[in-house]
Image (tube, rainbow, N blue to C red):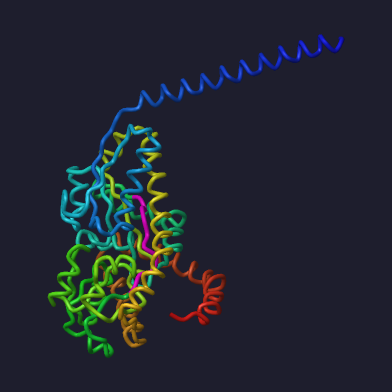
Amino acid sequence: MDRRRLLTNSAKALATGVGIGVASACTIRKEETATQLALPKIRWRMATSWPLSLDTIYGGAETIAQRVNALSGGNFQIKPYAAGELVPGLEVLDAVQTGSVECGHTASYYYIGKNPTLAFGTSVPFGLTAQQQNAWLYEGGGLDALNRIYSDFGVISFPAGNTGAQMGGWFKQKLSGLKSLQGLKMRIPGLGGKVMAQLGVNVQVLPGGEIFLALERGAIDAAEWTGPYDDEKLGLSKAAKFYYYPGWWEPGPTLTSLVNKSAWEKLPKEYQEIFITACFQANLTMVSRYESLNGYALQRLLKSGTTIVPYQEEILNAAEEAAFQLYEDIAIKNSDFRQLFEQWKDFRTQVFGWNKVNEFSLSRFSFQKISN
């Protein structure tokens, strides 16, 4: 074969290949377009427990809505609503359960009155860090266990945010040991509130948007929310001077997206996968934002006159003892709690043992050289 014929045949082959490639690409695009057109347009409402002013925690709901919209090409849209716009901030589970909204963004420990086991969906005193919590939920069987509880409410849950380790609350007066907790009026939800109640605290549960006024006007003597960035936005430093740490009741609290099970089952499989992916992103994005924002916010609070104070060992020891006694007491009365608690406790033991070796040893060395 001469050179001219070789080049001619090669050109024809290339043209044929390109033609096939173009045709294949066109076919794929047509198939994608056909699939997209075949999917229904769906509009959901999402009730949340958060005020608009708290852009990072409310941002968890916004992240879900934005990603669902983008990944579905605008066919599946979710509109989030701030606490109080559709339902009060502490009634999101009720709204999702009844179907008055299709989904919600909240903290599951707000609903321990319905089943105390739901506390594990957010955080429990002396429990797991954010990373450990994710490991338990995604890989340690935690999410499956929680969804067995949520099935009683006709709801399915997805991790959709985490604040990271929290601070230990704002106090108008400095604590002077266990005795100073007697009769103290404090906003603190979940099982952390139950533990504080056992230590003599008069526990209040308020949504975030109501904390500042209650603290400023003296309706409560102390309050916890999340950490420096959000607490600064709520103005809590203007109502109390002493900022305690650590937040032993919330070492790694997960925020949760709840979905009405009937609404979920009506979704096309593609939309279900999109929603799950959006919740994954919200979970990672929120904790990353808090970790990047809280340090700067703490420095601003310190410069403005806030005094940070560590909890006394006496209080921490009493709180830990009360917490695990509380778990045992609830487990005796509640089989759901007992089953999940035993599984969670086993996971906690092994992950604490590992992190003591791989993380705590390094942190202990590195952090001792850092001061505020």
- Percent x, y of residue 80: 26, 47
Residue at 39% from the left image edge and 64% from the top image edge: 293
- Percent x, y of residue 199: 24, 82
Q: Quadrant of residue 334?
A: bottom left
Query: Which quarter of the rendering shows the C terminus?
Result: bottom left
Magenta residues span 158-167
Depth check, front residue: 238 or 131: 238
- Percent x, y of residue 97: 21, 47
The reply, left or right, for residue 31 in relation to residue 255 is right
Query: Which quarter of the rendering shows the N terminus?
Result: top right
- Percent x, y of residue 272: 36, 38
In the image, residue 305 above or below residue 209: below
The reply, left or right, for residue 46 in relation to residue 29 is left
In the image, residue 314 above or below residue 277: below
Depth check, front residue: 262 or 358: 358
State the count of labels.
0
Residue at 28% from the left image edge and 72% from the top image edge: 192
In the image, residue 197 above or below residue 336: below
Indicate whether residue 131 is drawn in magenta.
no
Indicate whether residue 165 is drawn in magenta.
yes
Residue at 26% from the left image edge and 72% from the top image edge: 224
Residue at 38% from the left image edge and 48% from the top image edge: 279
Residue farthest along the right direction in this orientation: 2
